[in-house]
Image (cartoon, grey):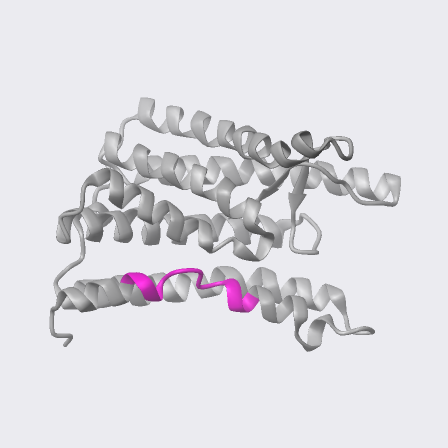
């Protein structure tokens, strides 16, 4: 049994920031990424390791919160009508375009290169494993950053809801630091929108559907990008979207 203190609540939140970054770094720069190593194996390890890290950290954090008596009500609010869910899916798909727009800004400002849409796939093909990984990660991230983070900060620590939404968005975005600082800015935007969806709807299902719709759109783009790369025999540059 954990003894309930404010320090425990904050410690749990801090411990959940960027749970998959070590996995991504290890697969990108560890033994599996050395010259002559099986790059496909490194990509597969990343596909399995990142969502597994999110699931493990989320499950542990929720368990500690429940045992410590500070599990927020936001984690249990799932009821939402069909109009909310449809609107969430539309918002999630639209966020893909918003993130691409943010990613295009630096290239527009420096005037270098032709803008083309691209998706971070972690070096692997956009197959069933990739789809499962980004969808599972989305579920864990919504439980963690919208359900637990916003709930604890607003309900338990009495922070203004706007501060809670912003803090949760930044924590969520830092989990994409491996993809670069621009990805953190893009994901902060999405995180704020997901948080606002939770606040205005009162249901965790709404930001979850939005997040799943966003990642489903990214997957469809990744499949299209992969076909184009195989046909052209090269890469794609421009505004990028990191799924998650």
Q: Which residue is drawn at 27% across and 27% down?
A: 81
Left or right, residue 163 beside residue 175: left
Q: Quadrant of residue 140?
A: bottom left
Q: Is residue 14 rendered magenta in the image? A: yes
In the image, 17: left or right of 110?
Answer: left
**Which quarter of the picture shows residue 191?**
top left
Can residue 243 be seen in the rendering of this structure? no
* The magenta stretch spans residue 151: no
Between 107 and 62, the one lying in front of the other is 107
143 sits to left or right of 210: left
Which residue appears farthest toward the top when viewing the image?
83
- What residue is at 49 percent from the left and 43 percent from the top? 185
Residue 5 position within the rendered picture, expressed as x and y whole percent measured from the top left: 12, 68
Q: Is 123 drawn above or below residue 49 in the view shown?
A: above
Residues 19 and 38: in front is 19
In the image, residue 163 sits, relative to residue 109, either above or below, namely: below
- Pinpoint residue 216: horizontal percent, then vertical percent: 54, 38
* Residue at 60% from the left image edge and 71% from the top image edge: 26
Residue 185 position (above or below residue 16)? above
The quadrant in which the N terminus is found is: bottom left
Magenta span of residues:
13-23
* Tally of marks: 0
């Amino acid at each position: 049994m954990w003894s309930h203190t404010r320090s425990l609540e904050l410690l749990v939140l801090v411990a959940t920031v960027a749970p998959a970054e070590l996995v991504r770094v290890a697969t990108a720069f560890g033994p599996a990424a050395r010259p002559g190593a099986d790059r496909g194996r490194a990509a597969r390890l990343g596909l399995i390791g990142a969502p597994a890290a999110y699931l493990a950290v989320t499950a542990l954090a929720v368990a500690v919160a429940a045992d410590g008596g500070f599990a927020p009500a936001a984690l249990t609010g799932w009821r939402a009508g069909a109009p909310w869910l449809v609107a969430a899916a539309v918002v999630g798909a639209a966020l893909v375009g918003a993130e691409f727009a943010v990613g295009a800004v630096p290239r527009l400002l420096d005037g270098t290169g032709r803008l083309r849409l691209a998706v971070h796939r972690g070096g692997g093909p956009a197959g069933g494993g990739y789809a499962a990984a980004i969808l599972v990660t989305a579920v864990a991230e919504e439980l963690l950053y919208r359900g637990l983070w916003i709930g604890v900060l607003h309900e338990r620590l009495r922070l203004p809801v706007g501060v809670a939404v912003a803090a949760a968005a930044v924590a969520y975005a830092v989990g994409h630091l491996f993809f670069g600082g621009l990805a953190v800015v893009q994901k902060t935007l999405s995180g704020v929108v997901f948080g606002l969806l939770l606040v205005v709807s009162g249901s965790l299902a709404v930001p979850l559907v939005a997040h799943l719709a966003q990642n489903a759109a990214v997957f469809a783009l990744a499949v299209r990008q992969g076909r184009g790369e195989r046909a052209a025999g090269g890469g794609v540059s421009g505004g990028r979207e990191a799924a998650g």
